[in-house]
Image (tube, rainbow, N blue to C red):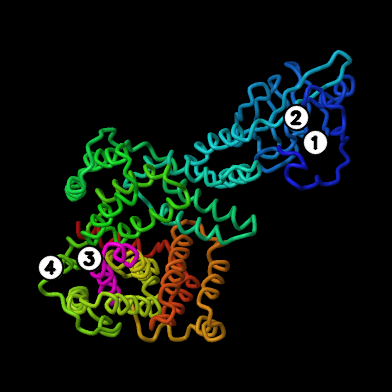
Amino acid sequence: MPSSDQTGKQPAPSLLPDVSRAQSINGGWQAATTVADLSKTGRKLVRLKGCQIAIFQTDTGLYACNNRCPHEGFPLMEGAISQGCVLTCNWHNWKFDLESGDTLTGGDKLRRYPVRLSDDGTVEVDMSEPPMAQQRDQILANLDVALHEYDYSRLCRELARLDLIGADPLDAIRVAFACRMDRFEYGTTHAMPGAADWLAYRAELSDDRERLASLAETIGHIAWDSRYRPVYAFSADVKDWSEAGFAAAVEAEDENTAIALVRGALAAGLTWDDLRPAFARCAMRHYAGFGHSVIYVSKIAPLLALLGAQSLESLILPLTRHLCSVTREDLIPEFRAFNVVRKDWDSLVASEPVTKDDFLGLPVARVLARIRRSAGDVQGCYHALLGAAAWQVRHFDHRVMYRADMPIGTNVNWLDVTHALTTAQAVRELATDMPELWADGLLQIGCFIGRNTKYVNDETGQADDAAIAAIEDNGDSDAILKNLLRQRVLDHGCDDYIEPVHRLKTIMMARAELAAFPDAPWRDDLLVAVHRYVNGEFPRRRALRTAHQSISFVGRE
């Protein structure tokens, strides 16, 4: 551990003998005790260079280690020695082999120190610190088991250890994506866009606990989505990159060919800027994955800006798998109009003025037809759609989440209606750089508007007094949204990851859109909608509904 002068923190007062001022022998060697004193009980607790060190005399030799158990910090001096050199922490039964340094039961590694006995009977402990790079590599190597087992507490401790030694804690996120990318059976999950937003939010924070919490949520989500999963190996083949070939492979759901082409692109030195158009076109080609494909592609660039180009492979191989395996909702009856309206688009698109009210109350096919009549004015159509999406979230009839007699196809909750918002942001960001994507992007937003028509009620959302008061009292939209981040996201108290990460994504979406369009007509609707959503209940498991649907399903088999 770093000494007090390295951390800038003074050790707490202690009754332990402090021999940190003893003469240093050969650099890091410190006189700790005498063999005569140690032999009285077989163990001795001393403070060296500000650290509590437990020294043990056993049948197999002398050993020194950090007195604090790496699990929860309980004193190992109170532990039991067995089998010559196995130390057990009696609080939670973690066991450490003092000879090899292995953790036999438990997780985190125990810090041990070399010990030697001088000619005059002095017991000396080497308190030298390993080089920072060596410590960093050991911590990163320790992550793999914690990721596989989803040991959230240990992941958080390892992040704290990286920060303590002055290493870049983002190295842990880089390693997590790299070593878990082939554990996502269907490719990219919410953990990737969540990482982009968690790390962006972390950059705004100054409190050490809050910064660590944002990192822990990032790496914890990666671990959660890949816990105990086997390896779903990616093809090792390499083919010369071809955007047309990539698009054809994705369309044919031919993952091996698509991966081989991506590997060829990486081998040729292509960057995300080079590949982004191909991925964006594939994501926009279908109303697919309930908008996730578009969101995932949009979040790669900001995440790479934080993690660096070295993370490109570990982010786009899972994304390729996702694009090849994702469900394509435009093939089911409710959304078939997506392809019907898109056909002959250029000859039929018009610039008829449109407002949010023109989209409300319409089914999917009529929403998409209305978009085509107005999409000649891209910006006007986008703002009308975003306004309609915000209004629908504000007026979401949350009572449908509690009905037990709902058919499977109508299992909706807050995530269903708010996805229109997060997809809209992704569409705007991608289509602003690639204008040819606007048509597909606007239609994707429209699919949400038409679907959500069934789940809104004019009477709901009108009495969100807290949100309305906040807007009236504080004209600073960003301040309102930052408040929600702190109150409802940072210390969320949720059992799963999807709820807090979606709160985060939705608030960050609102911040981005309001920063781009501060005087937009949908401003108040969006603020009230986000406030209502992040403060609403989120029932995830409905036992009676599941039972009702199971009986109905089995009865028709």
Amino acid type at mark 2: Met
The label number, if any, that marks residue 114 in the structure image: none
- Identify the secondary structure beneath mark 2: loop
Please report the bounds of the magenta region as a residue range. 428-453
Q: For marks 2 and 3, give the CA distance.
A: 63 Å
Which residue: 26% across, 80% down? Answer: 359
337 vs 120: above or below: below
Mark 3 or 4, nearer chain start = 4
Q: Nearer the viewer, residue 410 or 533?
A: 533
Q: Secondary structure at mark 3?
A: helix
For marks 2 and 4 on the same chain, the one whose residue lies earlier in the sequence: 2
* Displayed quadrant of residue 55: top right
Image quadrant holding the N terminus, namely top right
Q: Is residue 129 left or right of residue 422?
A: right
> Which residue is tagged 1?
49
Residue designated by label 2: 127
